[in-house]
């Protein structure tokens, strides 16, 4: 995910299972508040309240504060560079030659 690890990371598969059941997500201290909100709302256990599964569907996700200023048409047309302010704030960068994401 955004923080380099899946939200319910554990070295043990049973540990992952337990974390999913508990619904507790731990975020690094440097994590953006809007990123936290987006992830929590996407992982809401009650699917009747889960972002993206409400009346607005995917548009609700696209309108979330985390994506503020993102030109969805430009993204669809692959006209947006991989690098951006959000990536830098999370300590991530894109390797120019391969467009892969790496930790700085």
Image (cartoon, rainbow, N blue to C red):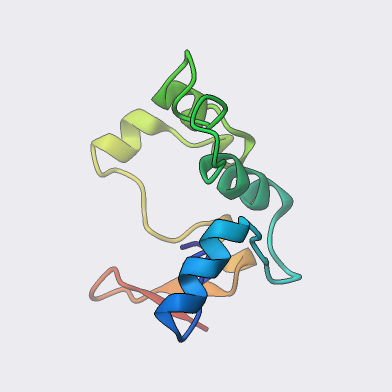
Residue 15 x/y as whole percent = 51, 77
Residue at the spot 38% in from the left edge and 58% down from the top edge:
82
Tell how many labels.
0
63 above or below 56?
A: below
In this view of the protein, which residue sits in the foreground, 32 or 70?
32
Asked if 6 appears above or below 48 in the picture, the reply is: below
Q: Residue at x 33, y 39 (%)?
A: 75
| Residue 96 quadrant | bottom left
Q: Is residue 88 left or right of residue 100?
A: right
Asked whether residue 17 appears in the rendered view, the answer is yes
- 97 on left or right of 16: left
| Residue 5 in view (yes/no) | no
x and y percentages locating residue 100 in the rendered image: 31, 72
Q: Position of residue 55 (x, y in %)?
A: 47, 13
Q: Farthest residue toward the top?
A: 55
Residue pictured at 55% horizontal, 34% vertical: 46
Residue sitting at 52 percent across and 84 percent down? Answer: 104
Q: Position of residue 50 (x, y in %)?
A: 53, 32
Q: Is residue 86 above or below residue 72?
A: below
Question: In this view of the protein, which residue sits in the foreground, 98 or 9?
Answer: 9
């Amino acid at each position: 995910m955004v923080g380099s690890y899946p939200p319910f990371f554990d070295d043990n598969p049973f540990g992952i299972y337990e974390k999913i059941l508990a619904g507790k997500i731990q975020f690094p201290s440097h994590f953006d508040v809007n990123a936290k909100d987006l992830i929590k709302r996407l992982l809401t256990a009650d699917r009747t309240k889960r972002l993206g599964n409400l009346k607005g569907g995917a548009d609700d996700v696209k309108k979330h504060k985390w994506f503020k200023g993102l030109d969805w048409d430009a993204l669809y047309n692959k006209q947006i560079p991989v690098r951006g302010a959000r990536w830098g704030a999370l300590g991530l960068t894109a390797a120019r030659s391969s467009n892969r994401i790496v930790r700085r």
